[in-house]
Amino acid sequence: QAILTTTLDTVSYIQPRKNLFSLVGVDIKVILPEQSQLTQSFRSLMIAVITGATGGYGNALCLQAKFAGYKVVGVSKSPEKLNMLRQSKSVDEVFALDYLVKDLDANLSDFEDFLSSKGITTVDLLINNAGIGSKQHSIFHETADELRHALEVNCIGPGQLIKRLAASFSLSTVVNISSRRGSVAQNADECISKTGCSYTYRISKSALNMLSLCVVDELG
């Protein structure tokens, strides 16, 4: 299995570590020693599940995945937006999955049943793109609920989805959309500005980065 972690600017393989994917805006480029071999293996991956699919960046990922030859399952919490996404032909299938629902396990089980009902037995690519933050920039204004919700959407939910798809659908590749705001090293750098970003976003994206490393340790 290949587990990837990414910022909005770059995607780098953790395993094998020599490989590098580059995502810039809506353009997907792959840089490897053997470009022709990569193109063949990249296009051979047929099923992609992309969360946060109804946002601008998620929609762009869906379009690029379809362009690369995937059958795309777009996932978001809004059924209305998902219907619009399906009508736009950016995806092949859609499913409403909300990481903040009271019974997430039941929602994830419904998603597994949905994939099976579509004849899907393997998932080749999962892009965990869904994410939230808050508008508060001070510890005196952040609430426990805001932090809890950010952790559920940005880390806990993606982790549970990885577990389900790896166990039931032979998940091959994971891309976790992170952020430089989740980098402990960059947040410790006095030369880098940290203004304009919430505690909840930075903490939850840092947790997502650790999730990626933990999954690699076990499954990579």
Image: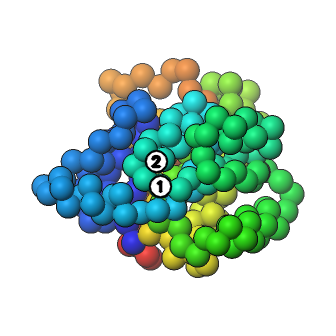
Quadrant into which the C terminus falls: bottom left
Q: Please tell me which residue lies in front, 218 or 184.
A: 218
Under circle 2, the secondary element is: helix
- Disc 1 versus disc 2: distance between alpha carbons? 6 Å
Question: In the figure, residue 135 lies in which quadrant?
Answer: top right
Marker count (numbered): 2
Q: Is residue 30 above or below residue 24?
A: below
Q: Position of residue 186 (x, y in %)?
A: 37, 36
Question: Residue sitting at 43 percent across and 36 percent down?
Answer: 8
Question: Residue sitting at 53 percent across and 67 percent down?
Answer: 123
Residue designated by label 1: 70
Q: Is residue 179 above or below residue 156?
A: above
Give the mark nearest the N terminus, 1 or 2. 2
Under circle 1, the secondary element is: loop
Q: Position of residue 184 (x, y in %)?
A: 42, 43
> Which mark, residue 84?
none
Q: Please tell me which residue lies in front, 50 or 143.
A: 50
Q: Is residue 99 visible?
A: no
Q: Amino acid at mark 1?
A: Tyr
Q: Please tell me which residue lies in front, 113 or 165.
A: 113
Check if mark 1's residue and mark 2's residue have beta carbons within 8 Å.
Answer: yes
Question: Residue sitting at 56 percent across and 53 percent down?
Answer: 72
Question: Residue sitting at 42 percent across and 32 percent down?
Answer: 26
Q: Amino acid at mark 2?
A: Ala
Residue designated by label 2: 65
